[in-house]
Amino acid sequence: MLTVIMAVSAGALSLLLGITLAVIAWRYAAIPRKLLFLWAELIRGVPLIFVIFWLYFLVPALFGGGIPNALSVILALAWFSSAAIMHSVLAGLQALPCSQYEAGIASGFTEFQVLRWILLPQALKNLIPSFVGLFASLIKDTSLAFIVNVPELTMVASQVNSRTQLFPTEIFLSIAALYFILCSVLSLIARSISNR
């Protein structure tokens, strides 16, 4: 259950942050976009395990106090995934014909209304396959939470295997099947949303 909670929480946060950053990059093409691209490349250019370490060890050292282990993993996953979502959403917005934006402005919509009611719904629907891939990776990346001692699915399986040492193949095949089921459910949900 903790794996599902971490994946859903990180997915929701990364979607919210990624869309917000994509809108900023779409609206302000000069320095803000370059800074966002630099930030995204920095995050995407390092292994996710480093981002988890940064949030788990560095943030408490800089600001004092500790972050709960599971929360640090959720924030690291969200931060890491939001960079990819930002690039995807920005590409989706830029792929739409400019005439739609111009028609919205000519119809009396504000720039924000055009974005909110015309452009974003189309871009997000077109990006559902990309989001499925990103969120499937996010589900599997929760297995890295073991590094900060979060008892998620893979860590619990390793602990059970260490205690029994009788059925390692069965234990880890069961875990693989559970990850497959979680990713398949995600794919089915995305398919039902895109068919609407």
Image (cartoon, rainbow, N blue to C red):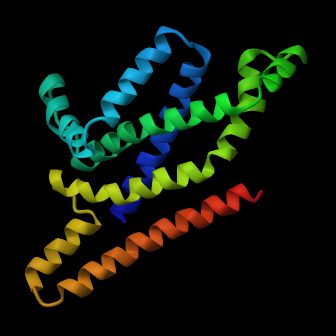
Q: Residue at x 30, y 81 (%)?
A: 173
Decide: is 50 above or below 101.
below
Expressed as whole percent of the image width and height from the top left, the position of residue 65 reads 16, 31
Q: Residue at x 65, y 28 (%)?
A: 94
Left or right of 42, for residue 101: right
Decide: is 143 above or below 83.
below
Q: Residue at x 46, y 48 (%)?
A: 11
Nearest to the observer: residue 96 or residue 189: 96
Left or right of 140, for residue 184: right
Quarter assignment of residue 136: bottom left
Q: Residue furthest top?
A: 31
Q: Residue at x 54, y 20 (%)?
A: 25
Nearest to the observer: residue 122 or residue 13: 122
Expressed as whole percent of the image width and height from the top left, the position of residue 12 reads 49, 45
Expressed as whole percent of the image width and height from the top left, the position of residue 180 reads 43, 72
Quadrant the C terminus occupies: bottom right
Expressed as whole percent of the image width and height from the top left, the position of residue 40 reads 39, 29
| Total numbered badges shown on the rendered structure | 0
Left or right of 74, for residue 145: left
Quadrant the N terminus occupies: bottom left
